[in-house]
């Protein structure tokens, strides 16, 4: 129905994080519109990954870093989608990067986060990890 004349209806929504699939709404106004319905398409959200940079590592020394994501719907799953990690270092789906690097060098890789929304959102970020000799 379309309001005309003095008929008015108000639909109030609650602000939620981007990528939220279900948006609660409260109706008030002319009873003629109380049975009306509307739908909204979920928006695709590019997740923001952190940290900005990684601390350097040393061959034979334990290394640990944690990736995070913002936006979308937690929890997030992290995966390496490009490049290579130093031998001895792994990325867990929780975002934990850890291990004992066994080779010095500069390693470039890309991490992707995927959220748990019904229509999953993703974000990627490129990283460089410098591993120096012991």
Image (spheres, rainbow, N blue to C red):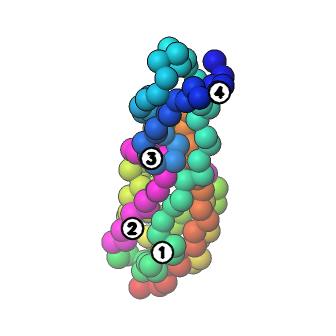
Q: CA distance from mark 2 to mark 1?
A: 7 Å
Residue situated in front as seen by the camera: 109 or 52: 52
Q: CA distance from mark 4 to mark 1?
A: 61 Å
- Residue corresponding to mark 4: 5
Vertical comparison of 28 with 100: above or below: above
Residue 22 can be seen in this image: no
Q: CA distance from mark 2 to mark 3?
A: 32 Å
Q: CA distance from mark 4 to mark 3?
A: 30 Å
Count of numbered labels shown in the rendering: 4
Residue situated in front as seen by the camera: 87 or 113: 113
**Magenta stretch, overall SS:** strand
Query: Which corner quadrant holds the C terminus?
Result: bottom left
Start-end of magenta stretch: 62-81
- Residue corresponding to mark 1: 54
Residue situated in front as seen by the camera: 43 or 93: 43
User: Which residue is at a point 64% across and 56% down the rendered structure image?
Assistant: 82
- Residue corresponding to mark 3: 15
State the SS at label 4.
Answer: loop
Mark nearer the N terminus (2 vs 3): 3
User: Which residue is at a point 55% across and 30% down the rendered structure image?
Assistant: 8
Residue situated in front as seen by the camera: 21 or 96: 21
Q: CA distance from mark 2 to mark 4?
A: 61 Å
Mark nearer the N terminus (4 vs 1): 4
Mark nearer the N terminus (4 vs 3): 4
Mark nearer the N terminus (2 vs 4): 4
- Residue corresponding to mark 2: 65
Q: Nearer the viewer, mark 2 or mark 3?
A: 3
Image quadrant where residue 126 sits: bottom right
- Within 10 Å of the Cα at label 4, are there few (<14), some (14-19), or many (20+) other Cα atoms? few
Q: Nearer the viewer, mark 1 or mark 3?
A: 3
């Amino acid at each position: 129905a379309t309001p005309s004349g003095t008929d008015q209806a108000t639909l109030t929504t609650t602000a939620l994080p981007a990528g939220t699939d279900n948006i609660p709404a409260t109706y008030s106004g002319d009873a003629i519109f109380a049975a009306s319905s509307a739908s909204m398409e979920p928006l695709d959200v590019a997740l923001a990954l952190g940290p900005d940079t990684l601390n350097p590592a040393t061959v034979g020394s334990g290394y640990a870093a944690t990736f995070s994501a913002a936006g979308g719907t937690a929890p997030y799953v992290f995966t390496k989608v490009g490049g290579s990690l130093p031998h001895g270092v792994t990325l867990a789906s929780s975002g934990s990067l850890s291990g004992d690097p066994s080779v010095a060098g500069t390693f470039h890789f890309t991490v992707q986060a995927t959220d748990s929304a019904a229509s999953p959102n993703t974000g990627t970020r490129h990283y460089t990890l410098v591993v120096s000799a012991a």
